[in-house]
Amino acid sequence: MVTENQQAGCLFFRAAVNQKCVLWECHPHPNGVWTLAVKGVEVDTGSSASESIAMLRQRQRTWIPQRFANLWFLGFLLLSGVAQAGDLPVPVGWWPGDTSTINLAGTNSAVLGGGGYAGAVFGKGFSFDGRSNVVSVPDDPSQHSPRITVACWVKFNELLTPGAATPGLQYLMFKRRPANSGFEGFALVKDRLTGADRFKIVLANGPGTANQVVTPGMTIVETNRFYFVAATADGSHVRLYVDGMLEGTSPAAFPVQCGSQPMFFGSSEESYNGRFSGALDEPQLFDRALSQTEIQA
């Protein structure tokens, strides 16, 4: 889908490309040529705005554009109403990897703790060895919404990693609750459940396991293939999706509550831990619970 808006002499539009929120702009030049750009970097030109938009629509079908760090017009797009109903939802945190720790939806870039990058679904994602690697994201207000969606693409190199608190436990995306008031603000993990490796999402409403809400999936996880995993919490229920399909639902009549510690990818960085071994691509955080239709978009 392409939506567009004419303002200040430029044509701005966003395109939905393979579960991506891709932001574009189109500039008129004095010589009559319109320039098509993605994230501020020129990628094509045409003799008219409509011709450039036609190029974009063709590229939607054939090309995943490289993402660039200088996303200076994101705020303009949101304020000018270009993000309209029917578009892909806009995350409050989006760390695509691609040999960079930049947050394309905010200012809190990630920090690599060892590791690096590996081939993934879209370019490269974050790489983890299951021993010491972690990616941390400094705390900021975007991580404190009472309703959330977390999502990522993930591929496992190993299903068992050394030192895990329980066999098979691997943390994908984790944010702790406020200190001394329980463990999981949210924890998207892979664990060994009833003899098989499955995804699960865990939220806590207080200290101890009695206050945990654990929502497991059904897919039996294998190595060396990518899964798209997403979880939502809307103040009423927690839902877990694998490859766009709803696999688990649990009542959870409480808001998500997160503390001031960083958000972590690939580890909890707590004494209760299980390190991830594999590639994690396009981790995203939303400040509301997306619908299944939005997750599948």
Image (cartoon, rainbow, N blue to C red):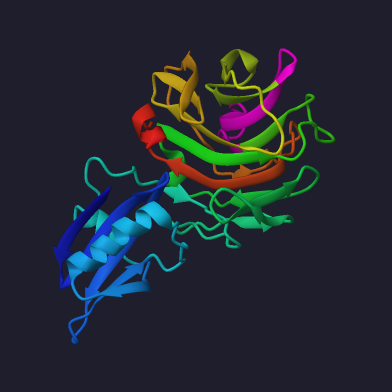
Q: Position of residue 246 (x, y in %)?
A: 46, 21
- Identity of the residue furthest to the right in this view: 162
**5 over 278 or under it: above or below:** below
Q: Evaluate whether residue 256 shows in this view.
A: no
Q: Nearer the viewer, residue 175 or 68?
A: 68
Q: Specify whether residue 229 is painted magenta.
A: no
Q: Quadrant of residue 49?
A: bottom left
Q: Residue at x 22, y 46 (%)?
A: 84
Q: Quadrant of the C terminus?
A: top left
Left or right of residue 98, residue 30 in this image: left
Q: For this view, does 169 lie left or right of residue 22? A: right
**Residue 7 seen:** yes
**Residue farthest bottom in this picture:** 31
Relative to 84, say whether 80 is above or below: below
Residue at 64% over, 16% down: 209
> Residue 132 location, x and y as percent?
78, 47
Q: Is residue 66 above or below residue 226?
A: below
Task: Residue 130: name its quadrant.
Answer: top right
Q: Is residue 100 above or below residue 204?
A: below
Q: Position of residue 159 (x, y in %)?
A: 76, 32
- Decide whether residue 193 is among the magenta residues: yes
- The percent position of residue 228, horizontal first and vertical second, equals 53, 36
**Which stretch is magenta?**
173-196
What residue sits 46% from the left and 66% below the top? 68
Horizontal side, residue 202 vs residue 31: left or right: right
Tell me what residue is drawn at x 45 percent, y 40 percent.
144
In the image: residue 264, left or right of residue 85: right
Chief secondary structure of the magenta portion: strand
